[in-house]
Amino acid sequence: MPAPKDIKQGKKVDKAEVDKLDKKKQVAGLKEEPSQVSGQFRYDGWRSCPYCGASNYCVGMDSDVYLAFRCWSCGNWFRA
């Protein structure tokens, strides 16, 4: 896991927005970085949960839009 200063902060998602999320298209934050297959280039990285502060490894982030992730520790949704 990277040093805390290298982990970017996620953005809180309010209850109304959480209710609108298509949960099938969202992903959970991971406690550990998964092993990568050679040749795969995804925008992945560590994000800090804005609710509990846990570090989440977020896979499949998009540089143009924020995606919703569920914290592995507290279960709250946040955007990264």
Image (spheres, rainbow, N blue to C red):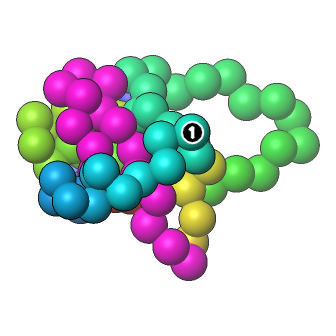
* Circle 1 Cα neighbour tier, 10 Å, few/some/many (<14 / 14–19 / ≥20): few
**Can residue 73 be seen here?**
yes
Residue at 41 percent across and 53 percent down: it is 21
> Vertical placement of 20 versus 45: above or below?
below
Say which of 3 and 23 sits in front: 23
Q: Which residue is mark 1?
A: 24
Give the quadrant of residue 73: top left
Asked if residue 69 lies left or right of residue 65, the reply is: left
Q: Secondary structure at mark 1?
A: helix
Q: Nearer the viewer, residue 72 or 2?
A: 72
| Residue type beneath disc 1 | Lys
Count of numbered circles in the view: 1
Report the quarter where the C terminus lies.
Answer: bottom left
Residue 68 appears left or right of 43:
left
Tell me if residue 49 is in the magenta stretch: no
Q: Position of residue 65 (x, y in %)?
A: 50, 73
Quadrant of the drawing holding the N terminus: top left
Residue 59: % across, % down: 57, 42
Q: Is residue 36 left or right of residue 28?
A: right
Whether residue 11 is situated above or below residue 59 in the rendered picture: below
In this view, the residue in front, 77 or 50, is 77
State the image quarter where residue 63 is shown.
bottom right
The residue at the point 21 percent across, 43 percent down is: 49
Image point 24% across, 28% down: which residue?
Answer: 75
Q: Is residue 49 above or below residue 42?
A: above
- Residue at x 20% of width, y 59% of height: 16
Up-down: is 39 above or below 36? below
Q: Is residue 77 magenta?
A: yes
Residue interval drawn in magenta: 64-78
The x and y percentages for residue 39 are: 89, 43
- Expressed as whole percent of the image width and height from the top left, the position of residue 68 reads 41, 52
Magenta highlight: main SS: loop
